[in-house]
Image (cartoon, rainbow, N blue to C red):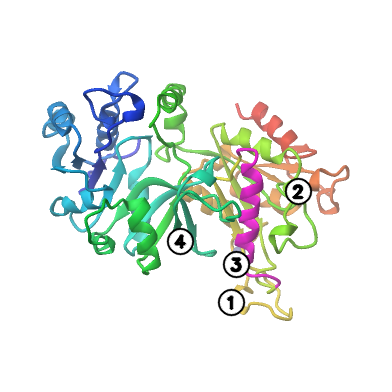
Amino acid sequence: MHTTEKHPIAVALLLGGKGTRLGLEGIPKPMVEVLGTPLLEHHVVQLREQGFTNLVFLTGYQSNVIEAHFGDGSEWGVQISYSVEAEPLGTARATRAALPMLGNEFVLLYGDVVCDVDIARFVDQARENGGHGTLVVHPNDHPHDSDLVVTDPDSPRIAAFLNKPHAEDLRTRNLVNAGLYYLKPEIFEAIPEGEELFDWGRDVFPKAVEDGYELYAYRSAEYMKDIGTPARLQKAQRHILSGSVAARSMRNPQRAVFLDRDGVINREINGVHKPDDLQVLPAVGSTIASINQSPFLTIGITNQPDLAKGFFGFEDLDAVHAEMDRQLVEDHAFLDDLLFCPHHPETGFDGEVAALKRVCTCRKPAPGMLINAAQRYNIDLSRSYMVGDRLSDLVAAEAAGAIPVLVHRNGEKDLPKDARVAHPAKHVAIDLAAAWEWIKEDMG
Ligand SMILES: [Zn+2]
C-alpha cells in the first residue's frame, strides 16, 4: 500500500450546493446519499486515507446539517474548520472568505463531485509548476457543452479559459475543467470587486488568464463526475460498485493502450501539417470509445520530426490535434493524453529549428515517451500495450517493457517494408479495431 504520510496542506471543500435537480429536501447537495453514505463522508474518508487531515468546509445552504453530522471531524480522524457564508457569495468569494484558514497554498475540491483522485500526486506536480495555481483538466465525450481550457501548444501553461456555450466553429483541444484546483492565495487578487456572485470557472479564471496570472493544467484520467441529476447519481453509483472509480485512481497502478498516431489513428500521408490533412481512419473512433470505457488509459505517442525540420510549428501541430479531438468526439471518443517528440537528430535541412535538432531520449525507437507517460500516470508498463505500424513503435514498446502490437499502416492489406523483417510484435492485426479485439482477449 501507499504511505499515508500526513499532508499539512489545507483541503477546502465547496459545499454550498442546493441539489434542487436531485429533489433533495432538508439536506444540502453534498449530503446526498451515495450507496448509503453521504457523498461528503466519502470525501472525508478518502482524504483521510491519503493523509489530508486539515479540512476547511465552505458551507452555506443548510450548513447546520453538515455541522451536525461531522462536528470537528475527530470521529473521522481529521480537523474540520467551517467557513459559513451568510448569503451566497459565489465559489471564488466563498473561498476568499476562508483565507485565514487556508495558509500559503491550498487544494480546492467541489463537494458535489464523485471522484477518487491521487491528490498528493497532483499537489507535487502543482508545486513543481509554480505560478498562481494548477487546475485538473480532462478530456470528456461532450466538450462542446463544457468549460474548456486552452494550454500553450508546447507547455501546460493555460493560455485561455473558455466558458460554455461555445461557438459552433470553435476548434480547441478536448480539455475540460474538472473542478479540482491547487491555488496560491495571490489568486484572490484576480477576483473582481463588486456585488455580484463570483464563480471560479465563470468569472475568475477567464479574466485571471487574460490578465497574465500564471495558471497550469494538470491532465488526469481519474474519475471525476458531477452528480447533479438523479440519472448521473445512479450512474456514478454503478461505477463505484463496478470498481471503475477506484481503478482509475492514480493511487493504483494503471494500464494503458499506447497508440502511434500516423497510420494507426489517422491516415498516414506525406506530412500532416494542417487540420485539413488529418483524417481519422475508419472504426478508430468507435474503437477508442470502447477503450475509454475499459480500465485502460488511451495515450497517443508520436514522433513529429517535421517540427525540428521547420516544416510546421507547434501551433500548427496543436491545430491538427484539435481537429483529431473533434473527429474522435463525434464517436464519443478521446485520448487521455498525447505525447509527441519534436526532435530530429540529423542536421542539414533548410529552415530547420536548431534547438530541436538533437539526439533525444523521446524519439521512437527510444522508449522515453512511454517511460514519461508511465511516471506521469502511474502506469504498469508490463501490463500495457503499444499499437504501432512501424518497427520503431515495436522496438520502443519492447525497450519500455510494454507489449508490442503491430498493425498494418492505414489498415492496408500489405505490411510496410520496415515491418516485414523480424520484429518483436506479440500480435499482428490489420487495424486498431482488430488489435483491440486481441488485447481484450490477451489482457487477462
Ligand atoms: Zn525527442
Residue under label 2:
389
Residue 355 is labelled as 1
Q: Which residues are magenta?
A: 311-332
Give the vertical position of 132 relative to 218 (above or below). below
Estimate how packed mark 3 is, as few (under 14), some (14 to 19) or many (20 or more) residues with alpha carbons within 10 Å. some
Spatial CA distance of label 2 from label 1 is 28 Å
Q: Residue at x 27, y 37 (%)?
A: 47
Q: Is residue 255 left or right of residue 412?
A: left
Q: Position of residue 83 (x, y in %)?
A: 15, 44
Q: Residues within 10 Å of mark 2 (few under 14, many from 20)?
A: many
Distance from the alpha carbon under mark 1 to that under mark 3: 13 Å
**Mark 1 vs mark 3: in front:** 3
Q: Which mark is residue 133?
A: none
Q: Earlier in the sequence, mark 1 or mark 4?
A: 4
The residue pinned by badge 4 equals: 160
Does mark 1 have its CB less than 8 Å from ligand 1? no
Q: Amino acid at mark 1?
A: Ala
**Marks 4 and 2, how far apart at CA:** 35 Å
- Mark whose residue sits in front, 1 or 4: 4
Q: Are marks 2 and 1 in contact (CB under 8 Å)?
A: no
Q: Considering the numbered disc 2 on the image, is that residue within a helix, a strand or a loop? A: loop
Task: Say which residue appears at 26% left-offset and 42% top-offset.
Answer: 14
Q: Secondary structure at mark 4?
A: strand
Real-space CA distance between mark 3 and mark 2, rounded to the nearest whole angstrom: 24 Å
Find disc 3 in the rendering and name its residue.
314
